[in-house]
Amino acid sequence: MAFNVVWLIGLCSLLLSYGVHVEASHKVCLDLQSYEHTTATHQPFRTGYHFQPAKNWINDPNGPMIYKGIYHLLYQYNPKGSVWGNIVWAHTTSTDLVNWVHHEPAIYPSIESDINGCWSGSTTILPGAKPAILYTGIDPQNRQVQNIAFPKNLSDPFLREWTKLPQNPLMTPIDGINASSFRDPTTAWKAPDGKWRVIIGSKTGRRGKAILYKSKDFIKWDRVNRPLHSSKKTGMWECPDFFPVSVKSEVGLDTSVITPDVKHVLKVSLDDTKHEYYTIGTYKLKKDKYVPNKGSIDDDSGLRYDYGKFYASKTFFDNSKNRRILWGWVNESDSEHDAVKRGWAGVQAIPRNIWLDKSGKQLVQWPVEEIEKLHEKPVDLQSTELKKGSVIEVSGVTASQADVEVSFALSTLEKAENMDPSWKNPQLLCSQKGASVKGSIGPFGLLVLASEGLEEQTSIFFRVFKDQEKYVVLMCSDQSRSSLRKDHLLDKTTYGAFLDVDPQHEELSLRSLIDHSIVESFGGKGKVCITSRVYPEKAQYDKAHLYVFNNGTENIRVSKLSAWSMKKAQIIY
Ligand code: DQQ
């Protein structure tokens, strides 16, 4: 059987390169799309509390919402195999965003305007608490068009069945819109003129675009000539998200709130690089235009929700707790061959609360509080000196499935290395100055999913540099030693970002959610997030260890560390 898999993988290619007409953003392995290998029994990389279905491929979170007290997560799913293809909207619900119950797919190809696929989209809650899903369908000519679906029975809190309107498709790629770059409708918002607005991701040449439509009744949509926003040289904008954030508090807002006390966020997912970036700015109602704040970087080097693996994300407003919640898809870092052998690919990140930082300059994210109900066996370390070169084990936690929070106090910054003005790219800097490259103040941080002899380790760490009178904090996640596996198909890219925290006045904090093959890290209380996928050979189950380390010449102190083993989430298939 393994022989067959290897052979089939040989046929995996980018669909475009075969000149087929569907332009998909995903790697397309035609021969593997409907190929189910016997699912392996040894599954060291399946997650304990990150959402995954029983088997097969998943990608983008779609149409998340809360309805009658029940959270709904819908997502792109291949019911027939563990690579991208045969896409439907799988459906799962929860009362706490932690434990999930599966339902039958909510949306699947059944009408002419989605017969070749049901791609991403969003939910809007219409007056009378009525959810409406707008999604991209692939029609018989492989054009991307926008469709609508409503729940069949509004008294069913699980919204198990959905009806597509006979008016579908509601929006088609006419008047110069590229039919293979027209997808992923956002949650719509209602402006004070009473009309709904929605944006659809697109591009013209290399200019990424958010095409804007307006509607009175949510059924008949008129295109606005000018896009809500566009930016040159970014390529296709997938899965845009547009929402208000309060400038006064951390509470989340309904997508239609437009007052002087809000700023707007536009996030786009870049098909070319598989990075997302966002800007914060102003929604100019009169002109129906979004204008990023002065000085915003409006391209791939802009602000990111997550500087690791995290894509096609989407937020929704949770009116039960007045918060905005972010979901994101975390793809694998190994090959299709591995996915086929395992029988699955992809996980969803832990949902994160998201709000505007006090500075107004960036967003902040934090795992939803509900996840803490999985905490068990707490372990605490108080004020521990981390001498230069030290590695101290945090014992007593199940290190393969854990939540750990640590704060570091730096007594002196005098010896910080100088920042070279040419160091503009934090990811590159992290890969040059990995965890094993000695510094002065740092690298220090956590070694997670580490083997006993440290041959395997994923290190999440900080380094502090001096830049004139300021200090610059670099946060990295170094996967280069995460697995003893040597095959070239394993992506061990080191990730990194600059963290806007002044270490003269604030301790440096780090939280990592560790779950067998995924590590989600939150630096500076959620100002920088980095997610990575790793596949340790040795550091599996009870052979995984957790350490704090300091590889700098200056001693530092762990002022507080709390770690918990995480119980398994209940996912009922
Ligand atoms: N995934 C969907 C598209 C979207 C892409 C197809 C982003 O709608 O643009 O599965 O990952």
Image: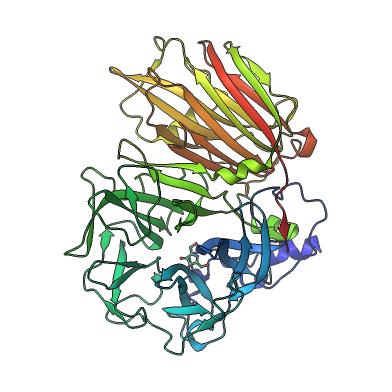
Q: Position of residue 4 (x, y in %)?
A: 77, 66
Q: 417 or 323: which is nearer to us?
A: 323
Quarter that holds the N terminus: bottom right
User: Does 177 appear above or below 68?
Assistant: below
Q: Nearer the viewer, residue 79 or 491?
A: 79
Quarter holding the C terminus is bottom right
Which residue does the image show at 21% across and 65% down from the upper left? 288
Residue depicted at 22% across the width and 42% down the height = 295
Residue depicted at x 48% and y 40%: 529
Q: Position of residue 418 (x, y in %)?
A: 36, 17
x and y percentages locating residue 403 in the rendered image: 63, 36
Question: Taking 190 as reference, is 179 above or below it?
Answer: below
Q: Nearer the viewer, residue 300 or 89?
A: 89
How many marks can you see? 0
Residue 379 in sight from this viewpoint: yes
- How is the model colour-coded? rainbow
Q: Nearer the viewer, residue 127 or 273?
A: 127
Left or right relative to 208: residue 109: right
Does residue 212 appear to the left or right of 488 in the view shown?
A: left
Res 21 seen here: no
Q: Is residue 268 above or below residue 195?
A: above
Q: Whole-percent x and y of residue 60?
A: 53, 61
